[in-house]
Amino acid sequence: MTEGSEHIFVVLVENRPGVLQRVSSLFSRRRYNIDSISVGPTENPSISRMTLLTRGEDRIVEQIEKQLNKLVNVIKVVELSPETSVCRELCIVKIHTPDNKTKEHVIQYADVFRGSVVDVSPKSLSVELTGDSAKVEAFINVVKGFGIKEVARTGVTAVQRG
């Protein structure tokens, strides 16, 4: 992973094939990792919104922002400040629960973290959790001792406050 500060970019793009590949290629050419990316249509179905999280030196990330603005199909690039933005992530964690006592413990942890049990099977529970990345990490660390079977995370999505 590249050292440096965390940067969150919102990139509005035309909803066309190949746009995601062009954006990700820009990062890889600069030898920068995309720590998380979420993409979806906006209120206008012809425009998609990408939220990218990366870490790096400010000077180089500024260059990436300038290069993003030059890409065909990119409409707008905005760097969000975590302090002035609402940032959330969705996570589903499948946890090994071989008995009812373990299930009860996991359900209690889910309640504390305001998560929801979304699937129950004889040997596992799946918990859905929404929050900032620190909350998601904290939940994963708490239930790690039970045995995590699977984790699915959306990556960060964010909007400017106000």
Image (cartoon, rainbow, N blue to C red):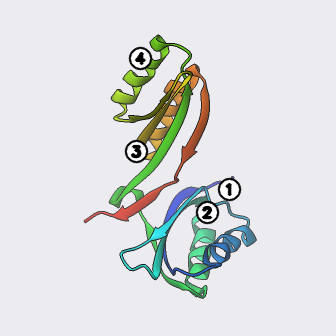
Establish if 76 lies above or below 6: below
Q: Work out how far the residue at label 1 is from the one at label 2, CA to CA, in angstroms.
A: 8 Å
For badge 3, the amino acid type reads Thr
Establish if 21 lies above or below 111: below
| Residue picked out by circle 2 | 57
| Residue picked out by circle 1 | 2
As drawn, the label of residue 104 is 4
Establish if 29 lies above or below 103: below
Question: Which of disc 3 and disc 4 is earlier in sequence?
Answer: 4
Identify the residue shown where x is 55% and y is 33%: 94
Identify the residue shown where x is 62% and y is 81%: 67
Disc 1, disc 2: CB below 8 Å? yes
For badge 2, the amino acid type reads Glu
Q: Nearer the viewer, mark 3 or mark 2?
A: 3
Residue 77 visible at all: no
Q: Work out how far the residue at label 3 is from the one at label 2, CA to CA, in angstroms.
A: 29 Å
Tag 1's secondary structure?
Answer: loop
Q: Work out how far the residue at label 3 is from the one at label 1, CA to CA, in angstroms.
A: 27 Å
Disc 1, disc 4: CB below 8 Å? no
Q: Quadrant of residue 33?
A: bottom right
Q: Work out how far the residue at label 4 is from the one at label 3, CA to CA, in angstroms.
A: 21 Å
Q: Nearer the viewer, residue 73 or 101?
A: 101
Tag 2's secondary structure?
Answer: loop
Tag 4's secondary structure?
Answer: helix
Quadrant that contains the C terminus: bottom left
Question: Which of disc 2 and disc 1 is earlier in sequence?
Answer: 1
Q: Quadrant of residue 43?
A: bottom left
Q: Work out how far the residue at label 2 is from the one at label 4, CA to CA, in angstroms.
A: 45 Å
As drawn, the label of residue 130 is 3
Question: Which of disc 4 and disc 2 is earlier in sequence?
Answer: 2
> Percent position (x, y) of residue 128?
44, 39
For badge 1, the amino acid type reads Thr
